[in-house]
Image (cartoon, grey):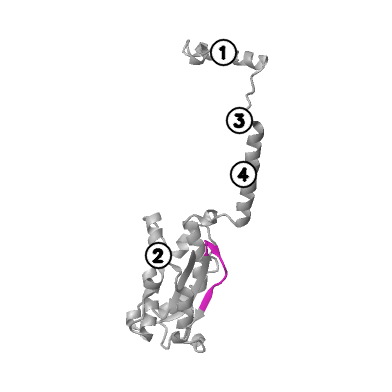
Amino acid sequence: MRQIVLDTETTGLEHEAGHRIIEIGCVELLSRRLTRNDLHLYINPEREIDEGAQAVHGITLESLADKPRFAEIADELIEYLSGAELIIHNAPFDLGFLNNEYQLLNEAAEKLESRCSIIDTLVDARQKHPGQRNSLDALCKRYEIDNSQRELHGALLDAQLLAEVYLGMTGGQGTIELTAASEGENAIAAVGLEERIRALGARPRVLAANAEEAEAHAAYLQRLNKSSEGQCLWSALENPF
């Protein structure tokens, strides 16, 4: 399965108010393994950035002056995302902005939800940890993921942290399927076990107790019978030795 952990940074909180995407970070997982085939884009929003938003991510309009407009990266992004399962923390926010960007280019543009299946880790975290804080920072702390570099929000850094959170929240690396090498080793071990079983023959070997062991066992049963006031059922059994 191909999964993309995705995060965005924006000029403000509401795309309905004309705010735009300024950064996109994507981290690819194949069969729950990080591939390092990530995608990181800065985008010129062609509008001012709210002070509140800038305080969160630290990105200035001046730093984006030479970056491409969304129209210039739209095809690259949709090609990268199409067909993957998207993992997003608070998915409605990021999807709302992404869908808005594509609809600004083409009002009939297909929504990402139609191209990709979506996992919202905020929804999953609230179900798994009801009544607790489930921000990305809180989840990093809960799953012992180092987020000390996260002084400011950043789309790629947050996507990388969310990928680790997702793996931890859904079972961690321990749930990854066996590699081809380990499958081969298990197959060899299984063959060796079958050969050893055949070597023993159809009937299992029976090791009878020697006289000393039988005497020790009988003495133990006598003590057990005495302590139970004659209720030891084992004493009534025929001596197996």
**Is any part of residue 217 visible from this angle?**
yes
Highlighted range, magenta: 30-40
Is disc 2 placed on a helix, strand or loop?
strand
Read off the residue under disc 4: 190
Is disc 3 placed on a helix, strand or loop?
loop
Q: Earlier in the sequence, mark 4 or mark 1?
A: 4
Amino acid beneath label 2: Asp
Quadrant housing residue 214: top right
Is disc 4 placed on a helix, strand or loop?
helix
* Label ID, residue 197: none
Q: Earlier in the sequence, mark 2 or mark 1?
A: 2
Mark toward the viewer: 1 or 3: 3
Q: Quadrant of the C terminus?
A: top right
- What residue is at 54 percent from the left and 73 percent from the top? 38
Circles 1, 3 touching at the beta carbon (< 8 Å): no
Mark 1 vs mark 3, CA separation in Å: 26 Å
Read off the residue under disc 2: 120
Q: Is residue 22 left or right of residue 196?
A: left
Read off the residue under disc 1: 239
Mark 4 vs mark 1, CA separation in Å: 38 Å
Q: Is residue 218 left or right of residue 74?
A: right
Q: Earlier in the sequence, mark 1 or mark 3?
A: 3
Mark 2 vs mark 4, CA separation in Å: 41 Å
Q: Is residue 215 left or right of residue 89?
A: right
Mark 3 vs mark 4, CA separation in Å: 18 Å
Amino acid beneath label 1: Asn
Mark toward the viewer: 2 or 1: 1
Read off the residue under disc 3: 202
